[in-house]
Amino acid sequence: MRPHRSLEVTSKFAIPTRLPVVVINTGGTLNKCYDPIAGQLIVSPDEAVISRLLESAAPNLDIHLMGLIHKDSLEMTDEDRKLIIAAIRTLPGLLQQAPIIVVHGTDTLHQTATMLDQANLDHVVVLTGAMRPAELEPRESALHMGLALGFLAADPPPGVYVAMHGRVAPYAFLRKNYDQGVFRPLPMTD
């Protein structure tokens, strides 16, 4: 287990009093909301949706929410992905050691995960999102965010992971199944 900055010792275990977590919001379906003027779902240009999802965990977390890109993942470019990498590389002070959640659209999540992995960031990075907007169906988004936070609290080794539909795995082993509309583990091969 990697050492944490501020520890409160209880019985046999040392746990952080407030786990620092960086949440980078890039948009995606999870962030979509209904725009009554345009008459369509749009990616929210702020962090309101993510803030609501994180409210119940706030007493135990030192959350640093960063709105970086507010796009549907189908509109993301490699330049946008480079912005995510740059944001992680330039985290200030103690946040340089903090685990990271990237809220991302599901369609190109693996392209971003691949670039993050190739950047050799030496961080724990968990990408998560949702197939339905949190504004319309909040349970899926809450489950995925909770899954990502719980995984980070277990202090995993550095790497790029995906947290979706009840599973967390290294990004190369959990993929979106377009036929089923969920993320599924890839079959094991010999």
Image (cartoon, grey):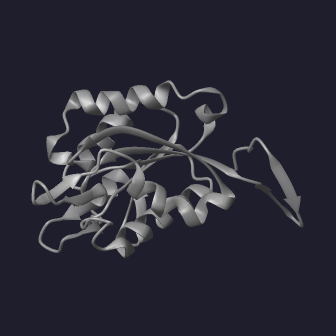
Give residue 97's position: percent from left, percent from top. 62, 36
Q: Residue at x 19, y 33 (%)?
A: 77
Q: Position of residue 57 (x, y in %)?
A: 59, 63
Q: Residue at x 56, y 55 (%)?
A: 152
Depth check: give the residue in front, 188 or 130. Answer: 130
Number of labels in the image equals 0
Image quadrant containing the C terminus: bottom left
Asked whether residue 30 appears in the rendered view, the answer is: yes
Instruction: In the displayed orientation, state which residue is furthest to the front.
Output: 37
Report the front residue among 188 and 111. 111
Q: Residue 161: percent from the left, percent from the top?
A: 42, 52
Q: Is residue 136 above or below residue 79?
A: below
Q: 38 left or right of 133?
A: left
Nearest to the observer: residue 33 or residue 174: 33
Query: Would residue 177 be found to the left or right of residue 159 on screen?
Result: left
Whether residue 165 is visible to the viewer of this picture, yes or no, is: no
Tell which of 137 and 167 is nearer to you: 137
Q: Is residue 131 left or right of residue 55?
A: left
**Left or right of residue 135: residue 159:** right
- Res. 118 image quadrant: top left
Tell me the quarter of the picture where residue 82 sits. top left
- Measuring from the top left, give residue 3's x and y in whole percent: 74, 43
User: Residue placed at 29% from the left, 33% from the top?
Assistant: 81
